[in-house]
Image: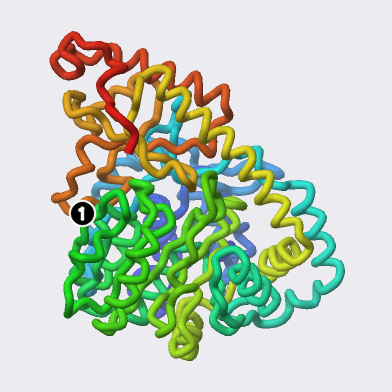
């Protein structure tokens, strides 16, 4: 490698002295780390345009003072263990280096919010994390076959620029899929491929949010969305939720430009927005001139009844943006999602997307398009629904076996459910910490999982449990471990002597 040495031929200091001081400074400053092989004397001499003997004399002096070592057939390298004299020289050098100016003070935008954490601990025996799928459920063999097929047939695409809005074939199959699965009739031009739902949110915010924009959100809500809007200096307006989802009657009648909502499976409580409220919500958006971001993050997995038509499928006025992702069905590592925008926003959305990036990896998009078009994706979803349905039922049965008539919400769909604790239990955050000490990951509504505006009645007494990354044996063992952990709860914190099975009341 070339070493950054500059020589001043007009200086009063000799060339040998200049090279020595600069090499020593690089070593003492940690820029040339112990064990680093430095250029041969001939190479450095050619780089600097000086006599090789000058460089040889410098190397000999650095070797003599313990900065360098030389070995035959290996070369000259920085000493692995610098002697005490070198360490003392480090302090002298640092003290003598002149300060050329104060550090730059650039206008950095502070990060206001807090992003969700993936785990509350690194080593849990049973982690009921709500946002992961099973490691063994990805269709490895089929996916590999489609990758090979796509790569073999059209590998020349690697040399061409990507469409920032996404591969046309993928946008087409997504538009077709949404028609049948979610009742949404859109053209492929309205579909923009994103790197997961978080980039979709970023794109929507880039279009609609500026400093001071009032953004309405469910309370509690997905922390990643709240943090994103806060980073744009939006003013968040909380709207409470109940068993029927977002309480539309409590939405402000003016001044709100955007509403973020999870109607199919409210995050994190799991409530489904009723059809009556969906219609009222769309009417509110039309009256107020507000846009709605509909985050449909896990609607592919429904276990009871038919899914309600998506908000965008009911929208006749072009006020809904639909956010979808393959993270829950395929895996978050694929980094593929999509934002469906109203027709009026297509030009602005595509231009904004081009500013964020010039599209995503062609091979992944092309493979996903073929995976969907061939019917393999539909088969994969049916297999996943069957597996998750059994895990879903297993978790409910295990909770009822060990804790009685537990109050649960979010049972109709999704990959997690919410457990509403009895009033005489400790706060959910305390139970989360207690379970953690027993090697079990359960999640309270608080830092790292959801955003709570401080007025949510559910927060202190609700635990969130995901079931998608644990098999049925692990679910049963984990809940049994949890029951043993909760047996340590002081009597006055739990049932005051009553049977713990009678604490939870009837299901929501």
The residue closer to the viewer here, 481 or 54, is: 481
Q: Quadrant of residue 200?
A: bottom left
338 lies left or right of 130: right
Reading the image, the residue beneath label 1 is: 95
User: Could you say where residue 317 lies in the image, as x and y percent from the top left?
Assistant: 40, 85
User: Could you say where residue 23 lies in the image, as x and y percent from the top left?
Assistant: 44, 57
The residue closer to the viewer here, 500 or 70, is: 500
Q: Quadrant of the N terminus?
A: bottom right
Q: Quadrant of the C terminus?
A: top left
Identity of the residue drawn at 20% across and 37% down:
460
User: Could you say where residue 322 lies in the image, as x and y percent from the top left?
Assistant: 46, 71
Residue lying farthest to the front in this orientation: 276
> From the viewer's perspective, is residue 123 above or below residue 384?
above
The residue closer to the viewer here, 195 or 428, is: 428
Viewer can see residue 34: yes
Identity of the residue drawn at 43% across and 18% down:
401
């Amino acid at each position: 490698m070339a070493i950054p040495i500059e020589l001043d031929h007009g200086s009063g200091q000799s060339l040998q002295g200049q090279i020595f001081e600069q090499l020593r400074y690089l070593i003492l400053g940690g820029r040339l780390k112990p064990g680093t092989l430095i250029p041969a004397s001939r190479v450095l001499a050619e780089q600097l345009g000086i006599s090789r003997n000058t460089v040889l004399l410098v190397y000999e002096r650095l070797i003599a003072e313990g900065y360098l070592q030389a070995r035959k057939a290996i070369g000259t390298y920085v000493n692995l263990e610098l002697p005490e004299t070198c360490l003392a020289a480090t302090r002298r050098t640092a003290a003598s280096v002149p300060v050329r100016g104060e550090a730059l003070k650039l206008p950095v935008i502070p990060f206001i919010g807090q992003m969700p954490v993936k785990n509350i601990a690194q080593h849990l025996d049973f982690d009921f994390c709500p946002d992961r799928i099973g490691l063994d459920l990805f269709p490895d063999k089929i996916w590999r076959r489609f990758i090979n097929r796509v790569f073999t047939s059209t590998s020349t695409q690697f040399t061409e620029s990507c469409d920032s809005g996404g591969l046309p074939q993928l946008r087409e199959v997504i538009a077709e899929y949404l028609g049948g699965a979610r009742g949404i009739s859109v053209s492929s031009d309205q579909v923009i491929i994103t790197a997961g739902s978080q980039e979709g949110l970023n794109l929507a915010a880039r279009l609609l949010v500026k400093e001071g924009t009032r953004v309405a959100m469910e309370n509690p809500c997905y922390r990643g969305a709240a943090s994103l809007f806060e980073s744009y200096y939006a003013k968040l307006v909380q709207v409470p939720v109940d068993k029927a989802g977002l309480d539309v009657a409590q939405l402000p009648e003016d001044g709100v430009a955007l509403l973020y909502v999870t109607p199919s499976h409210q995050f994190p409580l799991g409530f489904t927005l009723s059809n009556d409220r969906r219609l009222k919500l769309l009417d509110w958006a039309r009256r107020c001139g507000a846009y709605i971001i509909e985050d449909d993050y896990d609607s592919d997995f429904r276990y009871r009844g038919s899914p309600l038509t998506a908000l965008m499928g009911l929208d006749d006025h072009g006020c809904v943006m639909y956010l979808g992702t393959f993270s829950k069905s395929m895996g978050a590592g694929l980094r593929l999602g999509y934002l469906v925008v109203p027709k009026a926003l297509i030009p602005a959305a595509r231009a904004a997307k081009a500013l964020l990036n010039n599209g995503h990896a062609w091979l992944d998009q092309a493979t996903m398009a073929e995976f969907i078009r061939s019917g393999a994706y539909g088969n994969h979803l049916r297999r996943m629904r069957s597996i998750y349905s059994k895990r879903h039922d297993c978790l409910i049965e295990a909770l009822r076996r060990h804790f009685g008539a537990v109050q649960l919400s979010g049972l109709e769909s999704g990959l997690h459910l919410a457990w509403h604790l009895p009033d005489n239990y400790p706060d959910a955050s305390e139970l989360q910490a207690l379970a953690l000490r027993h090697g079990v990951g359960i999640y309270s509504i608080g830092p790292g999982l959801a955003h709570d505006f401080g007025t949510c009645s559910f927060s202190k007494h609700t635990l969130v449990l995901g079931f998608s990354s644990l098999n049925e044996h692990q679910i049963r063992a984990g809940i049994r471990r949890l029951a043993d952990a909760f047996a340590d709860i002081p009597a006055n914190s739990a049932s005051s002597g009553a049977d713990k099975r009678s604490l939870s009341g009837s299901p929501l």
